C-alpha cells in the first residue's frame, strides 16, 4: 500500500517531457537525469523556496532560477538535500533557468539530479517560465481532450457490445481492446468463467484472482474495487452486485481506464444479474398458479398493469442456416438446426426489448413484451413479432410470432410483424370460414409437416429456396412436400385462385 503522507501524481492525463522538449519555441534541453522510462509531467510550478516539498502535490515540473541557492552551496550537501526533497515530494522534473542569477546550471545540481534520478531541464535566457507553464497547460488540455474522446468512444463501443447476441464475451473483448490488456470474469464461486485479450503469465493471473477475492462481497466494509501491481502489470478488480467480479490486467494504467472499466462493470452487472424485485415475485406467483391449474385470465393481472402483450420469437443472426454448396456450384440450404442461443445473450435481448419474461430454451428465444413497448429491430437478431393480445390469446399470438419469424428469416429482414390490418376473411363469418377451412384441408389433417410447409411456401410466394431456409430443410424436401400436398388436396397449385383459397383456409387455423 502507498504511504498516504507521500504526494503522488494526480489521476489525470500526463504530458511526456519529450513533447515539451520538442517545442522549438521553448528551446529546452535535458542535461541530467533519466530518460527511460520516458518522464511525464502533470503540471508546472515555479518556486524559489529552498525546500519546495510542502508546496508540491506530485507530478510537477518545478521551475527555478536558483535565487535560493547560497554562495557556498557547491561545497556542501545543499543540492543533495534540495533534489532529494523534490523527489520525495513526487516532483517529475526540475527546470533551471539560466540568467539572470546564474550564467550556467551549477555542476553540483547536475550531479545531484543524476544521483537521485530527477530529470533536469535547462531553460535558456530567452524563454520565460510563463511560456513553459503555458506550453505545459496547452499540452495537458490536448491530452485531456484526447482522453475524454477515448473514454466516450469506449463507452459507446461497450454499450454496443452489450447488445450483441454474445454480450458478456463481447463486453470483455471490447474492454480488453480499449485498455490494452486482459480481462476476466470470475463467478460467484471464484472460478474464472470468461476472459479476453492476451493472457498474462501465471503469477499475474493468480494475483488477479486473489485480488478478485478481496472485493467479493463478504459483509459491511467490503471494497467495491481494488488495485495492485505485480511484476510490472497493473491489476484491478471490480465487484458486481450479482456476486461476479471483473478483473483487469494492463501493462500500464491510463487515467481513463478506471472510468472505462467501471462502465463495463455496470453493463456486466446488468447482463449477469437476476432481476429480483416485486415484479419478479409476481411473475413467480403467476407461474406457480399456472402450474397448479389456474387459467391465463386469472394470472394475467400479476404479469403487469397492462393486459396486452407482444409475443416475440427471435434467433441470433450468426445462428441462421447458411447455404452450403450444391451441384454445379449452386447454393442449397443447410439441413442442420441451429444451436440454442446463449442464456446471457437471451437475457440481454430481453433487457433491450424491455422485458424479463424470457424463454431461451429451444431453437429460438421467446419473449413476452408489454404492449406499450413496441419491439424494435435489435443488432445481431432476427425477430418475429405477434399482434398485441390479452393473456387469453397468447397461444394464438405465439403462432403469429412463429410465422413472422419464419418470414423474417426467409427474407433476411431484421424484424417482421404480424399483419393486423382487416383482411378479406373478416367479411366471412368466423364459423363459416373455419368450417370451410376444415373441409378443404381435411386431407392434410394427419400431416402437420405438410400443412406448415404449404403455409410457409404460400407466404413466400412459392419460393423453394426461401421456404427451405425458413423451415431449415433441404429445397428438395420442400418440393416433395408441396407435390404431396397437391396430390392429397387434388388441386393444381400453379392456379392463383387455388393458392388464394388455400391461403384463406390456412389463416383460419
Image (cartoon, rainbow, N blue to C red):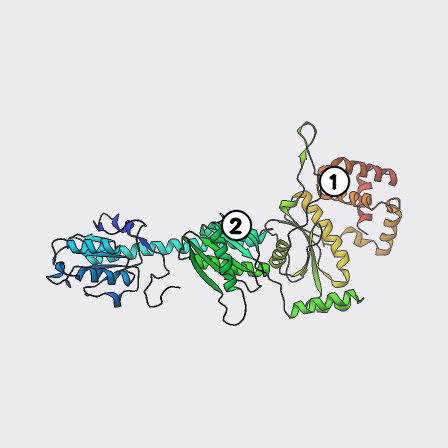
For label 1, the residue is 473
Locate residue 5 relative to residue 507 in the image: left or right.
left
Query: At 56% from the left edge and 51% from the top edge, which residue is drawn?
Result: 169
Locate residue 359 relative to residue 196 in the image: left or right.
right
Q: Position of residue 290 (x, y in %)?
A: 77, 65
* Residue 264 visible here: no
Secondary-structure class at tag 2: strand
Vertical placement of 506 versus 87: above or below?
above
Farthest bottom residue? Answer: 220
In the rendered structure, find residue 198 and report the number of the disc placed on it: none
Locate residue 67 relative to residue 4 in the image: left or right.
left
Query: At 63% from the left edge and 67% from the top edge, which residue is drawn?
Result: 276
Mark 1 or 2, nearer chain start: 2
Tell which of 253 and 490 is nearer to you.
Answer: 253
Query: At 74% from the left edge and 53% from the top edge, which residue is drawn?
Result: 400
Q: Residues within 10 Å of mark 1 (few under 14, many from 20)?
A: some
* Residue 10 visible here: yes
Secondary-structure class at tag 1: loop
Q: Position of residue 74 (x, y in %)?
A: 13, 58
In the rendered structure, find residue 196 and report the number of the disc placed on it: 2
Q: Residues within 10 Å of mark 2 (few under 14, many from 20)?
A: many
Tell which of 488 and 101 is nearer to you.
Answer: 101
Q: Position of residue 325 (x, y in %)?
A: 67, 32
Residue contact between numbered discs 1 and 2, judged by CB atoms under 8 Å: no
Tell which of 344 and 369 is nearer to you.
Answer: 344
Single out the mark in the foreground, 1 or 2: 2
Amino acid at each position: 500500500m502507498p504511504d498516504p503522507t507521500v504526494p503522488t501524481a494526480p489521476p489525470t492525463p500526463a504530458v511526456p517531457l519529450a513533447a515539451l522538449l520538442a517545442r522549438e519555441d521553448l528551446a529546452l534541453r535535458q542535461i541530467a537525469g533519466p530518460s527511460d522510462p520516458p518522464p511525464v509531467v502533470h503540471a508546472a510550478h515555479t518556486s524559489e523556496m529552498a525546500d519546495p516539498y510542502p508546496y508540491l502535490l506530485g507530478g510537477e515540473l518545478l521551475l527555478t532560477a536558483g535565487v535560493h541557492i547560497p554562495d557556498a552551496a557547491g561545497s556542501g550537501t545543499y543540492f543533495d538535500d534540495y533534489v532529494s526533497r523534490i523527489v520525495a515530494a513526487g516532483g517529475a522534473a526540475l527546470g533551471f533557468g539560466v540568467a539572470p542569477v546564474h550564467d550556467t546550471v551549477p555542476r553540483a545540481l547536475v550531479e545531484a539530479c543524476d544521483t537521485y534520478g530527477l530529470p533536469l531541464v535547462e531553460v535558456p535566457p530567452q524563454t520565460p517560465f510563463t511560456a513553459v507553464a503555458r506550453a505545459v497547460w496547452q499540452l495537458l488540455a490536448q491530452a485531456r481532450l484526447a482522453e475524454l474522446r477515448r473514454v466516450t468512444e469506449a463507452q459507446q463501443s461497450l454499450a454496443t457490445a452489450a447488445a450483441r447476441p454474445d454480450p458478456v464475451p463481447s463486453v470483455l473483448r471490447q474492454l480488453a481492446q480499449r485498455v490494452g490488456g486482459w480481462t476476466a470474469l470470475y463467478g460467484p464461486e471464484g472460478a474464472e468463467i470468461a476472459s479476453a485479450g492476451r493472457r498474462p503469465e501465471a503469477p499475474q493471473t493468480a494475483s488477479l484472482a486473489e485480488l478478485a477475492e478481496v472485493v467479493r462481497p463478504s459483509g459491511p466494509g467490503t471494497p467495491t474495487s481494488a488495485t495492485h501491481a505485480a511484476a510490472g502489470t497493473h491489476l484491478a478488480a471490480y465487484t458486481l452486485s450479482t456476486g461476479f467480479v471483473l478483473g483487469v490486467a494492463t501493462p500500464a494504467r491510463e487515467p481513463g481506464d478506471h472510468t472505462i472499466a467501471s462502465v463495463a462493470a455496470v453493463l456486466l452487472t446488468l447482463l449477469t444479474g437476476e432481476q429480483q424485485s416485486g415484479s419478479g415475485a409476481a411473475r413467480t406467483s403467476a407461474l406457480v398458479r399456472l402450474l397448479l391449474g389456474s387459467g391465463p385470465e386469472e394470472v394475467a393481472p400479476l404479469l403487469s398493469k397492462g393486459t396486452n402483450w407482444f409475443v416475440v420469437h427471435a434467433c441470433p443472426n450468426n445462428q441462421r442456416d447458411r447455404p452450403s454448396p450444391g451441384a454445379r456450384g449452386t447454393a442449397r440450404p443447410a439441413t442442420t438446426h441451429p444451436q440454442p442461443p446463449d442464456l446471457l445473450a437471451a437475457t440481454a435481448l430481453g433487457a433491450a426489448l424491455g422485458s424479463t419474461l424470457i424463454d431461451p430454451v429451444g431453437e429460438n428465444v421467446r419473449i413476452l413484451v408489454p404492449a406499450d413497448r413496441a419491439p424494435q429491430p435489435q443488432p445481431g437478431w432476427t425477430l418475429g413479432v405477434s399482434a398485441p393480445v390479452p393473456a387469453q390469446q397468447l397461444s394464438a399470438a405465439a403462432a403469429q410470432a412463429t410465422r413472422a419469424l419464419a418470414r423474417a428469416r426467409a427474407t433476411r429482414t431484421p424484424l417482421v410483424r404480424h399483419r393486423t390490418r382487416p383482411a378479406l376473411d373478416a367479411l366471412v363469418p368466423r364459423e363459416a370460414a373455419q368450417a370451410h377451412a376444415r373441409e378443404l384441408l381435411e386431407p392434410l389433417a394427419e400431416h402437420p409437416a405438410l400443412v406448415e410447409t404449404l403455409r410457409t411456401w404460400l407466404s413466400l410466394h412459392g419460393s423453394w429456396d426461401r421456404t427451405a431456409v425458413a423451415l431449415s430443410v433441404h429445397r428438395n424436401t420442400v418440393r416433395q412436400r408441396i407435390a404431396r400436398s397437391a396430390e392429397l388436396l387434388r388441386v393444381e397449385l400453379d392456379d392463383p385462385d387455388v393458392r388464394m383459397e388455400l391461403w384463406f383456409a390456412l389463416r383460419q387455423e
